Image (cartoon, coloured by chain):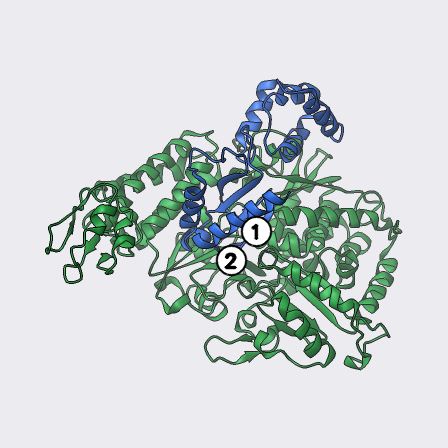
Chain colours: A green, B blue
Amino acid sequence: MTVAKITGHDELNVLRQNYEDEIKSEPVRILVCAGTGCQASGSLKIWEKMSELAKNTEVQIEFAPEIAHGKNHPAVHKSGCLGFCEQGPLVRIEPLGVLYTKVQPEDCEEIFETTVKNKEIVHRLLYKNKITGEECFNQDEIPFYKGQTRVVLKTCGTIDPESIEEAISAGAYQALAKALFTMSQEDVIKTVLDSKLRGRGGGGFVAGKKWQQVAAQPEKTRYVVCNGDEGDPGAFMDCSIMEGDPHRMIEGMIIAAYAVGAQEGYIYVRAEYPLAVKRLTLAIKQATERGLLGENILGSGFNFKLNINRGAGAFVCGEGSALTASIEGKRGMPRVKPPRTVEQGLFEKPTVLNNVETYANVPQIILSGADWYRSIGTPDSPGTKTFALTGAVRNTGLVEVPFGITPREIIFNIGGGIRDDKKFKAVQIGGPSGGCLTEAQLDEPLDFDSVKKLGVIVGSGGLVVMDENTCMVEVARFFMDFTHRESCGKCVPCREGTLRMLEILERIVAGQGEMEDIDKLRTLADLIIHTALCGLGKSAPLPVVSTLNSFLDEYEAHIKDKKCPAHVCQKLKQYVIDPEKCKSCSKCARGCPVQAIHGQPKMPYEIDQTKCIKCGACISACPFKAIYVA
Amino acid sequence: MLDSSFYTKTDEILSKYPAQERSLIPIIHEIQETYNYVPIELLPYIAKHIGITETKAYSVASFYERFSFEPKGKFIIRVCDGTACHVRQSLPVLERLRSELGLSDKKHTTDDMLFTVETVSCLGACSLAPALMVNEHVHPAMTPDKATELLKELREEASKS
């Protein structure tokens, strides 16, 4: 079936109205979350089961008489990520608005009988407030959603990301039409500039400035590139946007292309996100068929072609010049700047390079204006930021909050506090380029400039919460291991410096560190920060610097006392036999692979700590539970 | 020496892309998806077709972590060791998989070519940590015991097909 191209704003509006009516005519609308998280929890099976049940179910239109148009089968759709991944698979039923959590295939029939047919609630599938124990009927009642402000994620989770009709009905491409038909290129740039939208990939550079600089270049061949190479471990915001609302981001890119006069664009996506690649590919195809991409967009005479490039597992490709090199078919290695990407970026042409979330902010800014945008967030960091809230927090998931909110609000109100009532220790922000915030820093506002003063960065938006059971020295070692492995090797400070820092950290977590290692770490960090070639290299030592500043006592415990206060570091664990419980049965000694356990009949056995390799074999061998980890 | 079917297949892939340097990475992706690895003998052939030197093709193919010159197993298990998975104990899952399959950080693929076990920086399923991916399917909230169970299921699946 070929679909007609849309050739004007009026036509787009008519279509939008038609699609809206179409959706409203569905007497019951069942949305099954099909983000990466819920799919992993098995949501596709639920979608299949629901679709099958829907075929055989007739619903009386009295369910919602004011909006029903006579269709009498419930409609079952896949939706984008609803964010509350921890409670997945999630199912939302409209127009009731009820949200069911942790739904299993065997619950589907009950949901149909009770909710779809009889409009009653399946109470056991409702989310229960973890503090008060109260049932939460819909999203708005759940504390996880209450504290959020959803701008970028507004329709992520309410529409089917594989349907351009649903996207259009929810207002997609309205901003594009507004820009193309009522605004000059300068107007668009001015609006984005006035909104003070700052790059969401980590740097926080004002997006409008990049656009302005590209538009001012004498070279007329220009590119618009989207950085979807979300490589920071512990971050999946961009993944959710690309999967859950691909048209919003694509629309932002087309608007950018119009503003700077670009003819072609590229989306660079990690290969580890197959679902995002699939949905973006489909969205581009649909938008092209509808005349929203390609030649003569919406009949305006503006042309823009969009391509997708898959990454190939190199973290460094998140750096601008490495990313464009990778699109060109080269090794993804950063180059010396200047010339900057806005002057000579992709194929040495002027290039606008922004992050997924940055582009996804653009349509709403064009529609509602710069003043509206600046009314959210703080004066210098306007708007919202999406965060991936993970780690030792009760409610993990995808959240969107206005800038200026405190980390405490995010972790304790939205996130519901620390799992298993443990004690909060730190929250890691900014991934391998960031650092840790401590309890004392939790009430500082979260925005680009405030967190910089604390020695960390907002970064792309990973928030990994750590409890008392996390060893901060081991965390520093983990990040250094990561950056060392991912170093592209072009410049010496990053290639060799991160390796030396890693070696020192490995010594410390093995109990072989010396106090002068702390000074060595600081010296190396300082050197790398000031001499590495690219932003990723320059920020690689930050997790170490930040933990040294806030958790020096933990480093000292590893070095001086040879102890890991959080009992994490394997080599510092001591296996001990409780003489009271030991029955001298010798099972432990026989099970020990390195003959570290000795003893005599009727005397408690002992472990020789110099020989012990901490394998734990003795613990499993002991029938009297006499062996424990000190 | 590869048999001629490899070159026929490669021609088919090459015909989908413009003969330019920028097509190199997408082409290698498709080769890897077809064979589960990149037969190194194909690189000079691809390089000649798109007009770059052999060394350049090799330097690119060897730079990216995802491309492998070693044949991989039928099931590629990528254990996520991102921050969120790491703090929620992803390493014991990796260790269990390796010990059950007789693999290590040096040996990634079983001799029967059924399983490859490797780590990955982040799968984007952080809220369901620790996660792992089997080919393109994500498995959430793993434990060492669930990993053992998963291997059993995959073996059954393999014996059926």
Q: Of A340 and A620, which appears nearest the observer?
A: A620
Vertical arrangement, residue A229 with respect to residue A419, above or below? above
Q: Residue A470: image x %, image y %?
A: 35, 56
Subunit bearing disc 2: B
- Please identify, in this view, whether the residue under mark 2 or under mark 1 is nearer the observer: 1
Which residue type carries mark 1? Answer: Val
Vertical arrangement, residue A140 with respect to residue A230, above or below? below
Which residue type carries mark 2? Answer: Leu
Q: SS of the residue at dot 2?
A: helix
Residue holding disc 1 = B138
Q: SS of the residue at dot 1?
A: strand
Q: Of B85 and B148, which appears nearest the observer?
A: B148
Q: In the picture, which quadrant includes the C terminus of chain B?
A: top right
Crowd class of label 1 (few under 14; some 14 to 19; many from 20; radius 10 Å): many
| Precedes in sequence: disc 2 or disc 1 | 2
Q: Quadrant of residue A468?
A: bottom left
Q: Is residue A25 left or right of residue A153?
A: right
Query: Residue A250, can we see it?
Result: yes
Residue holding disc 2 = B128
